[in-house]
Image (tube, rainbow, N blue to C red):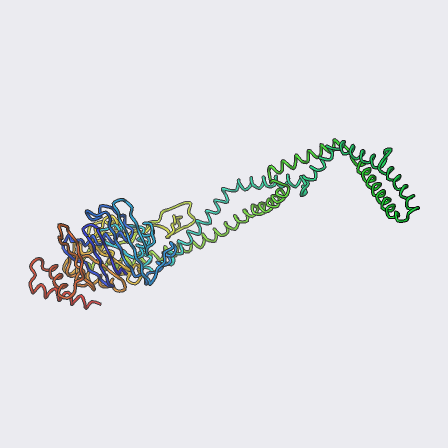
Amino acid sequence: MLKELRIKNYAIIDELSIDFKAGLNILTGETGAGKSIIIESLGLILGERASDESIRSGEDSAAVEAVYDISKIKNIKEKLSESGIETENNELIIRRQISRSGKNRSYINNSAVNLSLLKDIGDMLVDIHGQHEHQTLLHPENHSIVLDLFGNILPLREKCRENYSNLQNLQREVNELINKERERVQKIDLLNFQKEEIDKAELNTDEDEELKREKNLIQNAERLHRYATESYDILYSSEGSVTEKLNTVITAIGELSRIDSSTEKILNDGREVLFQIEDLASRIRDYSDKIEFNPNRLSEIDDRLAEITALKRKYGANIEDILNYRKKIDEDLEILSKSQERMDRLTTEIEKLKKEMEDTLMKLAREREKASDRFESMIEKELKELKMEKVRFKVEFFYEEDDSSFIKYKGKPVKFFPEGIGKIEFFFSPNIGEDLKPLSKIASGGELSRVMLSIKNILTNKDSIPVLIFDEVDAGIGGGVAEVVGEKLKKVSKGRQVFCITHLPQIASRADTHFQIAKKTSNGRTITSIKELKGEERVEEIARMAGGKIITDTVRRHAEEMIMKGDKIN
């Protein structure tokens, strides 16, 4: 429900704040007073495109703000939450700012939003019918929604949309797998080649470092042998070697110990040193015997290091990295091998989903055609009550053949869409002798409003949009039909909020809340004002609408009677 509308510097409106109520809200006033401007400003809140030409002359910006009670609107909180907008106390505040600089802004509960989201939310809040762009019936794609709502088959429609989306996703995944098949085969071939190359090398951790050490020894074999031989000779084999001299020393110490027993430990220590030097010389000799300069082995090492270096360039900075990459090859090959398994599963899922889709689409199509007969007759009945006695109304179904489609209807393959098979459009003929033509192309604003009023009357308690606005619903009617329109508006307003701009007292007298729009001149500027009429003020306004400039007591009494009659309508 629209609780409050605030307008500032929009068209001829200086500053306006209006508190609205539930039920039927009627807006009346002289031509040009600004009634339609209020509807236009509400259109901004619903996501209509803004123009700086709408900004009040002499001002740099304009603003429109609306406060809604959303406690009874299905799914709107979820929609807002998806966009990161939270609500408190079931209240929604939408604000639109227009600037001559072009820096226009839109806000929902103080969160900046784009026009697309604003329009999506607006479509859940308000439906405007009349001379403005926001007309549901001017868009044939909306006709199927109306019929599905009437036939209580929206769940089937939603199931079709869900199935369609799922099929698109599955087919997209299949196409991706097909497009990547060549790439997948090439990748498998490459990985197998890399796997064979690494396995053939039979790498060991730190093998390259060990090879480098061995290479260093072979390259320095002559020097190593020379140093070892020199060391052995000095220690043991040459004349005057360390061991020879040490033996002489030990012999001398032995003579000492025979004279002085206190030197016996020195003698023992000397013998131990001799033993250690002889052991050292022996080890040096063994080391020297093992030293070998092997050009063939050096060539083998160089070849092996070159092989390892080549693998490092391809697969990692060191042998450990190469071996880790080898493990990853196995993991990647396992994943790639499962692509065909995934393709088989997807094919099975698609076939199952196609069967489910066909069943659902066929059921939806049958239910729609069954509902269309009742819908046509009820719309014609409603319109005839609105003095369109010769009207004809028809729901047309267009099934486009498509040889590539797996959906068959009445024996022929047909194209299908998220919302079902075929297209639905309302056809209309207001007068005898005129052919049925698309409603969206031939109906006038007044006729459209009356058709919509009929639809809303039929769909009472089915349509979830809580606010309806009728502009031009009284175009081309008067007298008894105006009373019928008023009664139908009253009926539609039960359980929802309805706004209607009218010039007819028969309709205005049905209001639950009556607002008068007026304009006046102040300080050389035209200003639009609005006020809620009650009691005598309302009687005067109804009388003005009924009697023109000269309002007699008779006209006033007639106005009172119309108001009393309107108040009695349940």
Q: Is residue 365 visible?
A: yes
**Residue 324 image-quadrant placement:** top right
Could you say which is closer to the camera, residue 422 or residue 309?
A: 309
Residue 212's quadrant in the figure?
top right
Residue 288: quadrant of the picture = top right
Left or right: residue 340 versus residue 80 is right
Residue 377 appearing in the image: no
Picture coordinates of residue 72 (x, y %)?
32, 63
- Where is residue 513? Give x, y as percent: 20, 63
Q: Quadrant of the C terminus?
A: bottom left
Q: Is residue 159 depicted above or below 338 in this figure? A: below
Picture coordinates of residue 443, whole percent (x, y): 22, 50
- The percent position of residue 20, horizontal first and vertical second, equals 23, 61
Q: Look at 25% across and 64% down and name the residue there.
A: 494
Residue beneath the point at 19% across and 47% down:
57
Q: Which of the two residues, 39 or 158, is positioned nearer the viewer here?
A: 39
Q: Farthest residue to the right: give it.
A: 258
Residue 340 placement, left or right of 9: right
